[in-house]
Image (cartoon, rainbow, N blue to C red):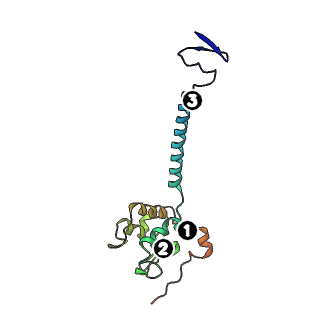
Amino acid sequence: MAAYASGRLLVKGLPAAPRAGRLPISLARSRIAVLAGTLVCLSSLTVGKALADEQLLFERDVLPILTAHCLKCHGLEARKAGLDLRTAALIARGGDSGPALEPGALEKSPLYARMADRSMPPKGELPLGDDKIEIIRRWIASGAKATAATERRGLVAAPRRVRR
């Protein structure tokens, strides 16, 4: 037997027909789920692209790697080959064999070459992972930038080398 509720025909055993312009709840939920999934996927792509395009900075991205793997031999206490890796300017200044990097030019950057061919850090020291070498590569390729605050404080200026 048919009955009317709120102007709609109800038939026993069949779901009520949706009102004009409205979707059944199950269909509406599935559309919402699809929309939410699409938004999550798009935001993931956007975040991933933003991280890939993000400007790497010496203090935030590179110095922690150098501190863990390099400063024992190329820092304040020791400067093997005359190389100090504590600041971007000191790295650019280089050591006994010249500049350790050329901003924007990987092929002219011995720092990257020695890390990429795994000759640095030497055997017996904590090795660099591929992800860390990639950060160094991207930093040099993007211009080897340091933060403006560091430059203003004068920490980027390299001290004069004392000739012995």
- Label 1 sits on what residue type? Ala
The answer to whether residue 4 is left or right of residue 123 is: right
Q: Secondary structure at mark 3?
A: helix
Is the residue marked by circle 1 packed among few (<14), some (14-19), or many (20+) residues within 10 Å?
A: many
Lower sequence index among marks 1 and 3: 3
Q: Which mark is residue 22?
A: none
Q: Quadrant of residue 110?
A: bottom left
Residue 119 position within the rendered picture, expressed as x and y whole percent measured from the top left: 34, 70
Judging by the rendered image, the residue that carries numbered circle 3 is 28
Q: Residue at x 45, y 68 (%)?
A: 65
Q: Are marks 2 and 1 in contact (CB under 8 Å)?
A: no
User: From mark 2 to mark 1, how far is it between C-alphas?
Assistant: 11 Å
- Answer few, some or many: residues within 10 Å of disc 2's Cα (few below 14, many 20 plus, some between 14 and 19): many
Residue under label 2 = 91
The residue labelled by disc 1 is 146
Q: Is residue 75 visible?
A: yes
Residue density around tag 3, few if under 14, some if 14–19, many if 20 or more, within 10 Å: few
Quarter of the image with the C terminus is bottom left
Q: Position of residue 13 (x, y in %)?
A: 53, 15
* Image side of residue 41 versus residue 128, left or right: right
Residue 106 vs residue 1: left or right? left
Query: For the view shown, which residue lies furthest in the top direction?
Result: 1
